[in-house]
Amino acid sequence: MTSSDLPGFSHQMIANGSVNLSIHVGGTGPALVLLHGFPQNHMAWAGLVPELSKHFTCIVPDLRGYGDSDAPHDDPDHVTYSKRVMAQDLAAVLDHFDLRKAHVLGHDRGARVAYRFALDHPDRIEKLGILEILPTSEYWDAWGAVLGLAAYHWTFLAQPSPLPERMINADPQAYIDWTLQSWTLNKSLDPFPASALASYRRQSASPARIHAMCADYRSGASYDRKLDEDDKANGNKIKAPVMFLYSDHGFPARIGSAETIWQNWAEDVRTQSCTCGHFVMEENPAAVLDCFLPFFTSP
């Protein structure tokens, strides 16, 4: 173990087959796994872990392809960066810490890994927290002018390699900065701590990580979408209690009744909304704590 860029946390690498995963761990209490989204890494949780770690043993991975985790090359069927494989990464993390079950809280892509983990490994999750997403297939089904313009990156990043990689690699920092600020309510980089912003820029300088991010979305447009469609057709629902927090100016708010959609995917769902942009943890951390601390600490 080595020191972490999350104060009070330790850092280690965990092997899951041929992929090494970067993990940050700190705090005491029941296990709570925190999963970041695009185009971020574990530093997305920097503002929340000081409080969360008072109540939980917080396990904060970098998803494969992000942060300091390995970034393997994508495969033709886009399974390598599927949420099913990333959920298997999460199961390996729990095995490493000898944990039978854990709470899981995910934002953006991490939330997609989280709900896939709940569907594929129902006996390994206590409670599920979802930040600012709806299931992948629901986005594609709802695609239209409003969502298409707001979430253009879903189709751009999913284009065949190497088109989006070449375009982003021409000026990766500009692309990451634009993405971060354009998805905030105030169109600003101000919500992101300097250390977090530096880590996002640093990972974007790696062509392998840009490829991984694109592969993440290629899987979302194909393999992940098909998994969701199969679950929906078979009536497979999330059994764990679910808390869903979304922004009243974010992506889910653009698709009808976000609450009703999640109720179709899980047996026990409660919902809250708050005022911010897409990056809820940085823009409105108080809302995240007010929502999820009672949820995860209640019997």
Image (cartoon, rainbow, N blue to C red):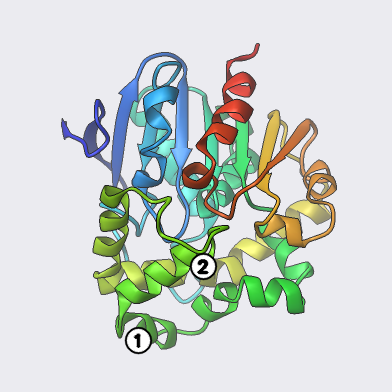
Amino acid type indicated by mark 1: Arg
- Where's residue 156, x and y in %? 53, 80
- Which sits earlier in the primary sequence, circle 2 or circle 1? 1
Seen at 62% across and 41% down, the residue is 130
Amino acid type indicated by mark 2: Ser
In terms of secondary structure, where does tag 2 sit?
A: helix
Instruction: Give the class, few, some or many, for how many residues have Cα within 10 Å of label 2's Cα (few <14, many ≥20).
Output: some
- Where's residue 193, x and y in %? 33, 48
Seen at 30% across and 81% down, the residue is 171
- Where's residue 166, x and y in %? 35, 86
Mark 2 and 1 residues: CB-CB less than 8 Å, in contact? Answer: no
In terms of secondary structure, where does tag 1 sit?
A: helix
Instruction: Give the class, few, some or many, for how many residues have Cα within 10 Å of label 1's Cα (few <14, many ≥20).
Output: some
- Where's residue 279, x and y in %? 52, 51
Q: Which residue is mark 2?
A: 182
Q: Nearer the viewer, residue 100 or 29?
A: 29
